[in-house]
Image: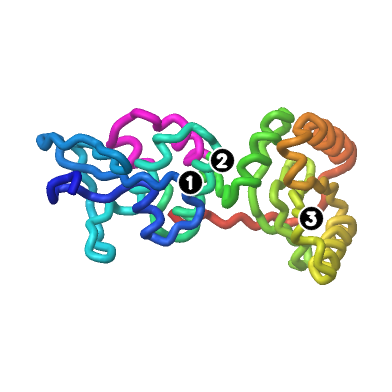
Amino acid sequence: MHANGFGVLTGFEAARRYGLQNVPPDRSVHLLIPEKHRVNSAKFALVERTIHMPTTRIIDGIPVAAPARAVLDGVRRIRELDPVRALLIEAVESGHCTTPELMDQLDSGSKRGTATPRAVLKEISTNIKSVPEAIATSVWTQAGLPPAEHNVKIYDPRGNYIAMPDEWCDEVGLAWEVDSFDFHFKKADFAKTIDRNNRYAAAGIVVVQTLPSRLRTEPDAVVAELRSAFRAASRRPRPNVVVVRQDRAA
């Protein structure tokens, strides 16, 4: 009605129609129309003229912008970092689009509102898979320590699995686990954590455990703990462990 039959659904409503869950609660309908047409936005509908009309898919009889375009059209209109992280990470992890597709879309479209999604895609390209991981990376960077790797697998020299830490500093053999209280509240999960920590200890790995909430409420204290653990780890030889890195699928 607002696009005179030329419109393509994009933004958050399009993301919902793809089944994505981490969509901000904005219920407006964002439509794209060819630049030569002049149709104004009205009430709940945001109608945007563009020279870059997207490729489309038909969902329930409605033309919808391809996932990469849809999610970017949504997040470039908000400034809060974590909602952008949540939606873009879900779009990639669910297989709806790839990081290169999102980067190409950013580079080819309007530059308005792209700074935050561009920063998030840089995070995702380092194998970050969740918002807590992204926040943890920011805290690690604040600590000024050597670069850490995400979700690599650690084995002892005999090939026995030790763990897959949230962050791994290979230079000194330091592991950082951002452990959720909710996960470890169950008896079986707590037992798994104890077993994991025992494997770390047996391998001579220094490990820091942090509750996700402290990344927001006590970042300076967490930074101090990481720096202290790094100093302790650097005073002994790097443990004899093998690191297995898996390249992220594009």
- Residue 125 left/right relative to 178: left
Mark 1, Cα crowd under 10 Å, few <14 / some 14-19 / many 20+, is some
Name the spot of residue 219 as percent of width and height, x first.
75, 33
Per the image, the residue denoted by label 3 is 181
Q: CA distance from mark 2 to mark 3?
A: 21 Å
**Closer to the camera, 59 or 229?**
59
Disc 1 marks a residue whose amino acid type is: Pro
Per the image, the residue denoted by label 2 is 82
Looking at marks 1 and 3 on the same chain, the residue that comes earlier in the sequence is marked by: 1
**Closer to the camera, 219 or 201?**
219
Mark 3, Cα crowd under 10 Å, few <14 / some 14-19 / many 20+, is few
Say which of marks 2 and 1 sits in front: 1
Q: Name the secondary structure under disc 3.
A: helix
| Magenta segment includes 211 | no
Q: CA distance from mark 2 to mark 1?
A: 10 Å
What colouring does the structure picture have? Answer: rainbow
When the figure is inspected, residue 139 is found, relative to residue 211, above or below; the finding is above
State if disc 3 and disc 2 touch (CB < 8 Å).
no
Mark 2, Cα crowd under 10 Å, few <14 / some 14-19 / many 20+, is some
Disc 2 marks a residue whose amino acid type is: Asp
The quarter holding residue 183 reads bottom right
When the figure is inspected, residue 211 is found, relative to residue 161, above or below; the finding is above
Screen quadrant of the C terminus: bottom left
Q: Name the secondary structure under disc 1.
A: loop
Residue drawn 24% across the image and 39% down it: 47
Name the spot of residue 204 as percent of width and height, x first.
87, 52
Looking at marks 2 and 3 on the same chain, the residue that comes earlier in the sequence is marked by: 2
Say which of marks 1 and 3 sits in front: 1
Tell me if I can see residue 69 in this picture: no
Per the image, the residue denoted by label 1 is 24
State if disc 1 and disc 2 touch (CB < 8 Å).
no
